[in-house]
Image: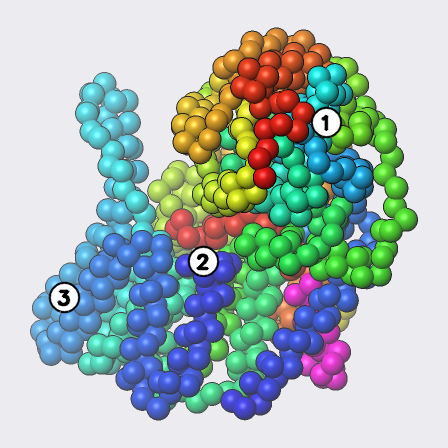
Amino acid sequence: MKTFINSILLFIPFSTVMYILLLIVWGDCVSKQLKTNLNYKIGSYGHMHSRLRNIETEKDIDILFLGSSRAYRGFDPRIFEQYGLHTFNLGSGSQTPLQTEILLKRYLDKLNPSFIVYEVHPETFTSDGVESSLDIIANDKIDRDMIGLALRQNHIKTYNNLIYGLYRDFFKKDISYKEEIIKDDDTYIPGGFVEKKIKYYDYVKYKKTSEWKFNQKQFDALDNIIFLLKQHNTPFIFVQVPSTQAKYKWYSNNNDFDHKIKKLGDYYNFNEIIRLDNKLHFFDSRHLNQDGVKIFDTKLLEILLKKGSSTPRQTKTK
Amino acid sequence: MPFNSIDFAIFLPIVFILYWFITTKNLKIQNLLIVAASYVFYGWWDWRFLSLILFSTIVDYTVGLELLKKRDQAKRRILLCTSILVNLGLLGFFKYYNFFLDNFVTAFSFWGTEIRANSLNIILPVGISFYTFQTLSYTIDVYKRKLDPTKNFIAFSAFVSFFPQLVAGPIERATNLLPQFYAKRIFDYNKVIDGLKQILWGLFKKLVIADNCAEYANLIFNNSTDYPGSTLLLGALFFSFQIYCDFSGYSDIAIGTSRLFGFDLMRNFSFPYFSRDIAEFWRRWHISLSTWFRDYLYIPLGGSRGGIGMKIRNTFIIFIVSGFWHGANWTFIIWGALNALYFLPLLLLKKNRENFDIVAKGKYLPTIKEFFGIGITFSLTVMAWIFFRAENITHAIYILSKIFSKSLITIPYFSGWEIALTTILLVIFFTAVEWIGREGQYAISNIGLNWPRPIRWMYYSFIIFLIGLFMQTKETPFIYFQF
């Protein structure tokens, strides 16, 4: 038994070191197809790298936008700028409350926003949030909060990317990386927005209905976010960016989600507020094209002005 | 509690520590710990079904003791029938009630009689087919006086509910497993290390090969109308590796876990895809079930003795019952019957007992004859798996008709095929390791035994790394849990 315990006590650190070394070598030398659970994606789809470099020059903004791709493709800072509002879009691909919480802890003090518009969508509340964690690990620093999140998610992809990310951070491997502003049809706009070259959605009708299955972890993280914002004395609203009506109505329990969010704060579901055309205002079933963005942002501004929440640096009383 | 879950990763070391450090001095308490751990393990799914295991345990324990007391053969037969009726009755109700009801209604409708009958919403208790057969083997062996009935209720409970093999086998014989609960277990370093190695290989098979193959097998089988014959054939190949690695992976983890506690379970798979004929395949696939049917059904029916008619009848019975054991669906019955058809020519030509040795033993490659034998056997098996996996017989026939059409000579395609190439490479790697290690109890049992310790540990670490890098992250239940 003593030999067994000694062997196990030796093998665990041995295999851990081997695992880390193999992960680093494999991550550096092997092609993407052979790295199923190690998709370290610096400068990934969604321009997160550019956004986080952009944030370094920002402070004391009027409105901070948070959320998923619906946010970084939905809130255009140029439209808000016309009304004298300085905004920043901190949305990222598949961002769920678990990652929003981390980002807020990192950037809330620095950006010191007067107001927050938090894009919520049932889909992000069904997700485990792994994809978004990988995005943040690859494009931002890895700190204690990120390690804490990895432990909470307890997912092999997050662990692998965290280890590999730590190695790249330590050896400053990504320091010289510069992300292209234009990638395929996407252009990064300073302020965190990503503009898609105008495209129209060839929309499909969904036959059967489906149901959202929520992940309680995401609602717990949302509670933490609200607590953080209240502590920071930053007012906020929740906004659901419109999807195509076909996609929106495909789900039978949208009301349940609305009900849950309404309990937590002011909530505007734009699927119910504005009517957009399934083809003309979207480039896919879930994302607005630039024509849709203009209509949506204008309506949002109208609501914010009515509410009195969007006068430059007025609302916040610190 | 599935083997591929975090819960089990926490549960196993706790039980291991309690077993070897706290209860090691008292055999009775050690057995009691096994029973408690097994009930926790099973109750993790649905604690209500623990009552079924307990009921089966009490019935067979009592029948065993009564069989010891009774000399009168008629009374002994009644006792045996009681055990069989109770065990198969429970199995029949939970697993086959709706199947028989639906077919009964369909049959009467065919003759113009409308019958109104409502199917019941019955949940199938996990592993019922496995532990039912295990307890039956005990009663039958006691009845045949091959085994003395136990008076130790705790040991018997541990035998029935032993958690490593409770839900998906190997289906143990009382003659092998029960005596192990009477003997004091001594910690054996080599046995425990070997057990850990087997668990590691089982996890690789399940998490890396089976679960990744499942992704594409499901995609192709669920959308079969969208694909040409070549893609459907690829789907059938993916399923063949999925089912093998899923089930044999489970068996490896079960056997390995048992070894951690000082128990030896019977082997359940012996590299079946390297079989040179169907008879050999069935000696190497799900050995614990095949031998169960051989000992408790085929031989009592007369086996291969008697005339040609008798041989054909017995072969069909054993294969069809084996198919039906897997589930209440005609696809399983056809799968069984198809295997009987494959097997019969060998039996009738007396060629069913030719390949008992390890293929190409001591050589790197098989002979051309062996190679073709393996190829043909594997192809026949893949064809049969289509029935096993299909939704219904029409679906299976549709897939086969597409495979045997001109569309077979096209390049296979499906969404995500670029990513599937990684899975194909992993399957090739896996097959190579299985081939190299085919002379061992499991593929990696003999590999690296004489290597220096650091090299050997690097090799195990590499397998752990492959699991971490390629494991499918969606938790996929073991296929055989549904049986």
Q: Check residue A311 in the rendering and tell me which mark sits there, or answer none.
A: none
Q: Which residues are magenta?
A: B448-465
Residue at (25, 77) in percent of width and height: B154
Do the residues marked 2 and 1 share a common chain? no
Do the residues marked 2 and 3 share a common chain? yes
Q: Nearer the viewer, residue B476 or A71?
A: A71
Residue at mark 3: B79
Closer to the chain start, of discs 2 and 3, is 2
Chain under callout 1? A
Q: Does A149 sit above or below residue A309?
A: below
Q: Nearer the viewer, mark 2 or mark 1?
A: 1
Q: Check residue A86 in the rendering and tell me which mark sits there, or answer none.
A: 1
- Figure quadrant of residue B465: bottom right
Image position, residue A306 (x, y; %): 55, 15
Q: In whole angstroms, how far apart are the C-alphas of marks 2 and 1? A: 53 Å
Image position, residue A317 (x, y; %): 57, 35
Q: Nearer the viewer, residue B108 or A158?
A: A158
Which class describes the residues within 10 Å of circle 1: few (<14), some (14-19), or many (20+)?
Answer: many
